[in-house]
Image (tube, rainbow, N blue to C red):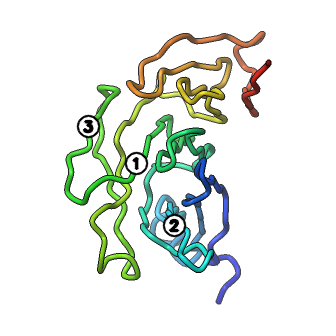
Amino acid sequence: VNPMQKWTLQQVAFSAGGKCLMTCETRRSPALERFDEDGTHGCVLKWWRLGEDGKYVLDSVAHDPHEADITVALAHPHKDGLFVTASLDGTFKSWDLLPVGSAAGNLSGGSGAFAGALPTSASAAGASKCWQCIAMGSWHARPVVSGCFSADGSTLVLGFHGFAVLWEHDTASELQALPTAEPTDKVLQMCSAMAC
């Protein structure tokens, strides 16, 4: 196998209870560069569940869930099956484990199709649920470079060039945009801490 075509693990997020995890993997396909420069990059989101034997088993897969590199992969600190991804394409998406065929709503009012992750053959036999995008949003079409949840999970904070923007997670409503000292500053890393 050509080393340039191997999948590379980019992001990992463990659920609050550790019963599931989400991974983001990417690869480049140099052979396609001659024909389609934009089509040379692939991304896969994978959801894994903890099996009875204590090992993670692949549960669902979503191909190319964003149009650019995923820069943020988060697990909600209290809701075991809720994850968030964000990307240089300027969008963020919330993912939840829902019954197959259920209509996922767009909480943010933004446009775009909602992706559902396909159950893997290992889980498809008894699959009555799959991971689905339940909300999608963006902020002035700026690339998302970092993110975190507040300790209680009520607020999602995303870092952009020149701003950190706070969102009410359950409705994907913008709460406040906090400017950095310079508009060109990048908010590269975020974390949440709780003071007692």
- Kindly identify which residue carries mark 1: 96
Q: Would you say the residues marked 2 and 3 are in contact, meaning their CB atoms lie under 8 Å apart?
A: no
Q: Is residue 101 left or right of residue 82?
A: left
Quadrant into which the C terminus falls: top right
Q: Amino acid at mark 3?
A: Gly
**Image point 62% across, 54% down: which residue?**
14
SS label for mark 3 = loop
Q: Please indicate, yes or no, whether residue 89 appears anywhere in the rendered image.
A: yes
Percent position (x, y) of residue 132? 35, 52
Q: Amino acid at mark 2?
A: Arg
- Kindly identify which residue carries mark 3: 105
In this rendered view, identify the residue nearer to me: 117 or 110.
Answer: 117
**Tag in front: 2 or 3:** 2
The answer to whether residue 54 is above or below residue 88 is below
Mark earlier in primary sequence (2, 3): 2
**Image point 65% across, 36% down: which residue?**
145
Mark 2–mark 1 Cα distance, whole angstroms, equals 13 Å
Percent position (x, y) of residue 92? 48, 37
The answer to whether residue 115 is above or below residue 175 is below
Give the numbered dot on residue 49: 2
**Tag in front: 2 or 1:** 2
**Can you name the residue that lies furthest to the bottom here?**
1
Percent position (x, y) of residue 173? 42, 19
Rate crowding at label 3 as few (under 14), some (14 to 19) or many (20 or more) other CA atoms within 10 Å: few
Mark 2–mark 3 Cα distance, whole angstroms, equals 24 Å
Mark earlier in primary sequence (3, 1): 1
SS label for mark 1 = strand
Q: Is residue 26 left or right of residue 47?
A: right
Rate crowding at label 1 as few (under 14), some (14 to 19) or many (20 or more) other CA atoms within 10 Å: many
Q: Would you say the residues marked 3 and 1 are in contact, meaning their CB atoms lie under 8 Å apart?
A: no
Q: Please indicate, yes or no, whether residue 159 appears anywhere in the rendered image.
A: no
